[in-house]
Image (cartoon, rainbow, N blue to C red):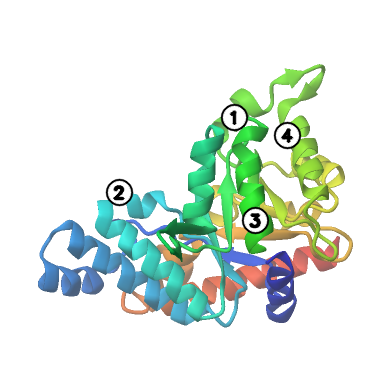
Amino acid sequence: MIQTLIEKIKKTGAPIVVGLDPMLSYIPKHIQQKAFAEYGETLEGAAEAVWQYNKGLVDAVCDLIPAVKPQIAMYEQFGLEGLKAFKRTVDYCKEKGLVVIGDIKRGDIGSTSEAYAVGHLGKVSVGQNAFYGFGEDFVTVNPYLGSDGVKPFIKVCQEEKKGLFILVKTSNPSSGEFQDKLVDGRPLYELVGEKVAEWGSECMGEDYSYIGAVVGATYPEQGKILRKIMPKTFILVPGYGAQGGKGADLVHFFNEDGLGAIVNSSRGIIAAYKQEKYSSYGEEGYAEAARAAVVDMREDIAGALAAR
């Protein structure tokens, strides 16, 4: 799957993943009203609004980008109906030819991680049959329970030819409370990065491993260090746009071949119509505003890489 992602990045010229992280406050009123008219102001109505919102976004940007990253928490808040919307979104994005990164941040003891891995990346056996649960192409994984929480995911990835992005240095302001703590004189995130590179060396594609890492755009200096520690690791870079990251912050996340990283933007794209820059599109044009934001992001990253 890492080769598929790389090929799509090359084809689109956009090392960009759009985070499909819907909140009701992002969804235009006309979409909400239509969903509520059919299902009432219920969890089912909210999930329908989420689904229709996502569908409009995907239709608008699918030819510009290689991948999407739905954050499962935004769907779980609506219970079972929200999870149905998550699954519909995953399936629709794959129909549109997009790579799907399930942002699930799972990581637990071995047997629990095995169940998470099977549910999101692999097949679950039911009698004589086997079924994909959610069926993403990649998922995000929290490594802080150690190898026995990660290896079940790696095993399923090897079986299914899928991939992982393992949390190494996250974009949130308080990430340093643990991730920057010194262990034998070195920040913990460096040691995690080394472990990710080790796991990845056993799971290589042509040029990059299908065991990737998450490193936030909001920490460019740490990204520079981790790029050297993990030269064959594809890095998922959150924190662009709404969290403050910009193209100039990203150059060190990429290798000299112009590959090695894919940059996420969520509300900066999916709620672009709320920004002054794109306000002329209005709520009715939310999807067109998202498309314009993707184009601007692509140009920003390309310009930064060309200038390095």
Residue 216 seen anywhere in this rendered image of the structure? no
The percent position of residue 23, horizontal first and vertical second, equals 33, 56
The percent position of residue 83, horizontal first and vertical second, equals 33, 57
Q: Earlier in the sequence, mark 1 or mark 3?
A: 1
Q: Residue at x 25, y 59 (%)?
A: 81
Q: Residue at x 33, y 50 (%)?
A: 76
Q: Residues within 10 Å of mark 4 (few under 14, many from 20)?
A: many
Q: Earlier in the sequence, mark 4 or mark 1?
A: 1
Q: Which mark is residue 77?
A: 2
For label 4, the SS is: helix
Q: Which mark is residue 192?
A: 4
Q: Which mark is residue 145?
A: 1
Tag 3–tag 2 contact (CB < 8 Å): no
Q: Earlier in the sequence, mark 3 or mark 2?
A: 2
Q: Earlier in the sequence, mark 2 or mark 1?
A: 2
Q: Residues within 10 Å of mark 2 (few under 14, many from 20)?
A: some
Q: Amino acid at mark 3?
A: Cys
Q: Is residue 248 above or below residue 197?
A: below
The percent position of residue 36, horizontal first and vertical second, equals 14, 68
Tell us which disc is closer to us: 1 or 3. 3
Tag 4–tag 1 contact (CB < 8 Å): no
Residue annotated with mark 3: 157
For label 2, the SS is: loop
Q: CA distance from mark 4 to mark 2?
A: 30 Å
Q: Amino acid at mark 1?
A: Leu
Q: Amino acid at mark 2?
A: Gln
Tag 3–tag 4 contact (CB < 8 Å): no
